[in-house]
Image: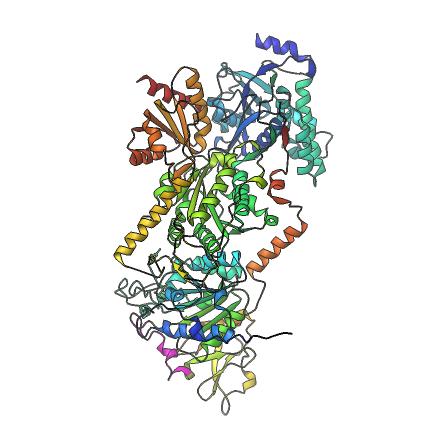
Amino acid sequence: MENDRAMAEAALTLDEVPREELESAVIRFAGDSGDGMQLTGGRFTETTALAGNDLTTFPDFPAEIRAPIGTTYGVSAFQINFGSRNVMTSGDLPDVLVCMNPAALKVNLSELREGGLIIVDTGTFTDKNLQKAGYEANPLDDGSLDRYRIMAIDISKLTLEAVKDCDVSKKEGLRAKNLWTLGLIYWMYDRDVAATVEWLGTKFKKLPNIAAANIACLKAGHAFGETAELPDGALVYEIKPATFRPGLYRTVTGTEALAWGLVAGSQLAGLKLVFSSYPITPASSVLHVLSRLKAYDVVTFQAEDEIAAAGAAIGASYAGALGVTSSSGPGVALKTEALGLAITAELPLILINSQRAGPSTGMPTKTEQSDLYLAVYGRNADAPLVVLAARSSAEAFDVAIEAVRLATRYMTPVVVLSDTFIANAAEPWRLPDVGTLEPFPVAFHTDAEGFQPYRRDAETLARRWVKPGTPGLEHRIGGLEKDYTTGNVSYDPENHQRMTDVRHEKIARIAGDIPEQEVDQGPAQGPLAVVGWGSTYGPISRAVERSRESGISVSHIHLRYLNPLPRNLGDLLAGFDKVLVPEMNMGQLTTVLRSRYLVPAESVPKVTGKPFKIAEIMDAIRAHSET
Amino acid sequence: MNDTVAIPALTPQDFTSDQEVRWCPGCGDYAIIKAVRKALAEIGTDTKDVVFVSGIGCAARFPYYMDTYGFHTIHGRAPAIATGVKLANPELDVWVVSGDGDGLSIGGNHTLHALRRNVDLNILLFNNEIYGLTKGQYSPTSREGTRSPSTPLGSVDHPLSATRFALGAGARFVARAVDTDQKRLPDILKAAHAHKGTSFLEIFQNCIVYNDGAFDAFAERKNAPETQIFLEHGKPLIFGKERDRGLRLAPGTFSLEVVPLGEGGVDESELLVHDQTNRPLAGILAEMEPPDFPMALGVLFCSPEESYEAAVYAQIEDAKAISKADGIDALLRTGHTWTVEAR
Ligand SMILES: Cc1ncc(C[n+]2csc(CCOP(=O)(O)OP(=O)(O)O)c2C)c(N)n1
Ligand code: SF4
Ligand SMILES: [Mg+2]
């Protein structure tokens, strides 16, 4: 039936094509690392955002820069979920799977929903490539894909035809096949090619022949759909703009939002930003973004290792700037000694941890939330600090600003937990007006009268911050225990107890300066609460929403403040019979909540390197609602 | 009308903090701190602008005893932390105090990179060829065969020369001194301070408790004239109590030889003349040691280049000059944006 309809419609021109209206769709672009899938996804994201849809993306790429061509471990994918409604996850199961080669099909097929559409470039389904991907027979012929719809097109050939008038080699021409495919998808979803044409023109400004070839392919793919030499199984869709709050929007990744939030935060604090880091996936991109912002008075420093990066950030804070460092996985482990120094020296410091799957080197490009213990507990001795987590790419901007506020107000390190997913995922962002945000300027201490470096503010318990260069306030600080009053080195037993207590109390008191925990959705007490933190926000939110629609009483609580925890959280949790904690680790927040509040929290762990699917959380909710 | 207010000259006392010094009596560190206070007083830098950053070790306690700004940090990391200080505020006069374990073992990597970057720091490496604070284990500069609690039968690994390490790392100022040499040490410290970029000064420091007399072969006063050569830029390489010996390249080789001067010896014109801008020369001078050669002290190498933080700030100023940067709100609005109208 569907096929017939597609065939019948095939002869119609674009305007006449009756488009099926969808609420949302999930597309997964998959190909070889060298096929430009991330670029394709990025362009589709921009165009889709400009078309007014809500969206979330999931770039999913291998750690190898150029794995051998055609292998399964060299497959790079980009998934986007977009719709006319609020989109909160990158989508459980793709509706459309674009496969630029057999390996891409092999790796991603299990993700496709039953009846979903597969678009393949038959030009790459050669015996050699099939063999490399581990196929014994061509899946396009052997009936193994009967449960799906297939658009088998020789994209390679059509790409070469499209570029024949462009001044490019065959190899250069073939590299544009991702844009041919993108053109076809644009047509399927009624998207305008203009923004991508403009982008290609700018990107390849110095290589006009390459720009021309790419643009020719984009248009050829689009025209292919339009003039409808369409094979069986194609459908065209319409996804109306989503309803957004009025305002000015852009798309943003977590990396960009964090970097810009740090710049905004340091300006609100009236401080110079000194950012020092050592390259590591996926944290490097924050360094890249900030390194381009020199004109905003940002000093960036690529240190010789993560320890030096943390050290330089501490040195910068000591000298009166805002020191920020960032890393992932093993790089964060290397910074732990330095964090201890910042804690006892009581200096502001921000550590951005873009968590990745571990232990050790683990899976560098895959996402996980398994550094919560490390952030909250991972130092020698009693060494408390502030831990915050961003729930989404756009929210990372606010979290970065809050990190700056807390670090400078309380003279403490703040760990910001992000993850691979947030770092790379893009979503629409309603732009804030930084000019209207409440500034929190740092007042450096300059009064020599009765000065002691560890004298504390009665309310915040923060010690005073003095810039070297201030006359009359020369003083020494360091990692040795300090006398409570004079700040001089002290090994006095009672004094150590007192200093440990005050360091602890200083962080605990921050609970009075952060908002009370709210319930994101659902009743404020009841049979079941799902508690999450970080990037699980999207899937938990959707899962709770759908479960509630199906009649289950369940609430969603999502934490931004992980240390200290919000002051009302214990009471809030006590109002639920059961607490369920989905996390991309083996139950770390679960342990924290249990130990802190003696609540019977239960873990829903997942460590596959991929975000939760909505269905997985719904299953857990259902299971815990039945018993 | 201009009233000139006489700024009182600084004295070493102005750089002395109220903290009780806790080094062992007789430790070489006392002599060094005395020379540093004297040098700073003579330089006349305001105490408020001076920052001492140290790692961990006996040497690293140094900042506590100076009435300047000071940061006693973590083992080996002082060069990195000091780099951050300098990046935040290039105006500060930043000194790093480190030991042979601190600066060359756990922190070797940071020392290396500070030197190669040429951050404007004065790095003072107190080399006592031992881990003092942890009670006397051998260190990366300990000579082969050193007996210590962790090497009861003598160490079997080869020592590192701090000075040659610094030269190899690309340091643009490398000098060497003896802790008790109160005549020359302040001047060398002043030269290190005057040099913009990283200045590296190795100070042979006697640990009276765990490695007493390690440097006697050349540091002992009675031996000094015959076993030390004090380098001066542009001057021939002459040493000896009677200034009767000199250094030259053995004819046809790139090896130094000690030759007698004057009657029966060679003429002064045949001697090597110290050129502190010549890195290979500094390298072979640094190799010398008693008994066959004198120990080279003073400024081995000095060839300034733009310092790291100056280059960093120059880039920032350039970026500002050409940028259309118009505040953070404008930054957020670069690239594609779209407006959603109220309905
Ligand atoms: C991370 C870490 N490892 C080990 C130590 C123990 N430690 C303190 S000082 C020191 C060696 C000091 O030797 P050196 O740098 O030569 O200084 P000295 O005491 O001789 O002046 C060691 C190993 C430490 N404080 N921190
Ligand atoms: S142990 Fe050695 S280096 Fe340390 S203070 Fe005593 S004498 Fe000085
Ligand atoms: Mg030592």
Of residues B86 and B219, the one drawn nearer to the viewer in this rendering: B86
User: Quadrant of the image for the C terminus of chain A?
Assistant: top left
Residue B286 x %, y %: 46, 72
Of residues B91 and A613, the one drawn nearer to the viewer in this rendering: B91
**Is residue B221 a member of the stretch shown in magenta?**
yes
From this viewpoint, is residue B234 visible?
Answer: yes
Q: Is residue A317 left or right of residue A577?
A: right
From this viewpoint, is residue A383 visible?
Answer: no
Segment colored magenta: B207-224
Residue A155 x %, y %: 62, 24
Of residues A20 and A464, the one drawn nearer to the viewer in this rendering: A464
In terms of image quarters, where does ligand 1 lie?
A: bottom left
**Residue B162 higher or lower than A538, as above or below:** below
Q: Residue at x 61, y 41 (%)?
A: B331
Of residues A203 and B23, the one drawn nearer to the viewer in this rendering: B23
Q: Residue at x 54, y 86 (%)?
A: B268
**Is residue A149 a member of the stretch shown in magenta?**
no
Q: Quadrant of residue A328?
A: top left
User: Quadrant of the image for the N terminus of chain A?
Assistant: top right
Residue B335 x %, y %: 64, 36
**Residue B103 higher or lower than A236, as above or below:** below
Q: Is residue A521 left or right of residue B333?
A: left
